[in-house]
Amino acid sequence: MSKHEHIHLEEEERILLKQLIHSGHSPARVQTRARILLLLDRSQGDKRSLERVAEGAICSVSTVRNIKRNFLTGGVEAALYEKPRPGAAPTFTGEVEAKLTMLACSEPPTGHARWSLRLLADQMVALDYVDGISHVTVGKILKKTTFSLGE
C-alpha cells in the first residue's frame, strides 16, 4: 500500500456506513471502523491526515492505518469486520466426551463401589480413548454435562 493512496467511497458505501453508525445495533468496534472510513473518505473534498482521523475517532494512528489498508485491499467488508481467528483445536471432542459420559454411567470396575475422577481418567487411557487426561479435566467435562458421580 502506497502512503499516498486515498479512500474514495461510493454513495452506496457512504449510506451503508452512516446507517451502521446511526442504527446503534452493530458492535462498537464496527461503528468505530465505519467512522474511520467516513473520516478518511476523500470523495467529499475533505483531506484529513491519519493523525486527525485518529483524533476524531479516538483511536491510534496504527488502527486508522490498518483499517485503511484493509479497505484498499479488500473493500468495505474487510475494513469493518475481522477475519475469524484460527485458535487452537479443542483437545477433547464431543465423541471423547460422549465416551467419558458413557463410561461414567456404566458399572464401576470390580473392587470399587463407584467411579472416581482419577479412576475414570485412568480407564479412559486404558481403553485408548485418549492418550492422556487428568482427573481435573474429567471433572470439568462431566460438570459441563451436568453429570454427578454422587448419589
Image (tube, grey):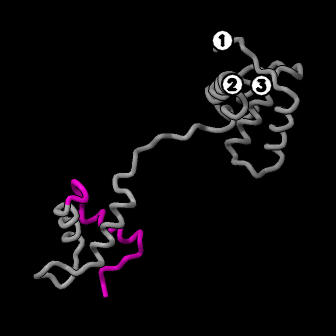
In the displayed structure, 108 sits above or below 8; it is: below
Task: Check disc 1 and report the residue beneath it.
Answer: 2
Q: As shown in the figure, which amino acid type bears the numbered disc 2?
A: Lys
Please, what secondary structure does the residue beneath circle 1 have?
loop
Q: Earlier in the sequence, mark 1 or mark 3?
A: 1
Q: As shown in the figure, which amino acid type bears the numbered disc 1?
A: Ser
The magenta stretch is 128-151
Please, what secondary structure does the residue beneath circle 3 have?
helix
What percent of the width, then of the height, locates residue 53? Answer: 74, 27
Task: Check disc 3 and report the residue beneath it.
Answer: 40
In the displayed structure, 116 sits above or below 134; it is: below
Q: Is residue 58 visible?
A: no
Q: Earlier in the sequence, mark 1 or mark 2?
A: 1
Say which of 34 and 102 sits in front: 102
Quarter-of-image position of residue 119: bottom left
- Give the residue displayed 80% in from the left and 30% down from the top: 38
- Give the residue displayed 31% in from the left and 66% down from the top: 99
What percent of the width, then of the height, locates residue 12? Answer: 86, 33
Q: Report, in whole angstroms, how far the alpha carbon at label 1 lies from the one at label 3.
A: 15 Å
Q: Report, in whole angstroms, how far the alpha carbon at label 1 lies from the one at label 2.
A: 11 Å
Return the residue found at the far bottom. Answer: 151
In the rendered structure, the answer to whether residue 126 lies left or right of residue 66 reads left
Labelled disc at residue 68 = 2
In the rendered structure, the answer to whether residue 126 lies left or right of residue 95 reads left
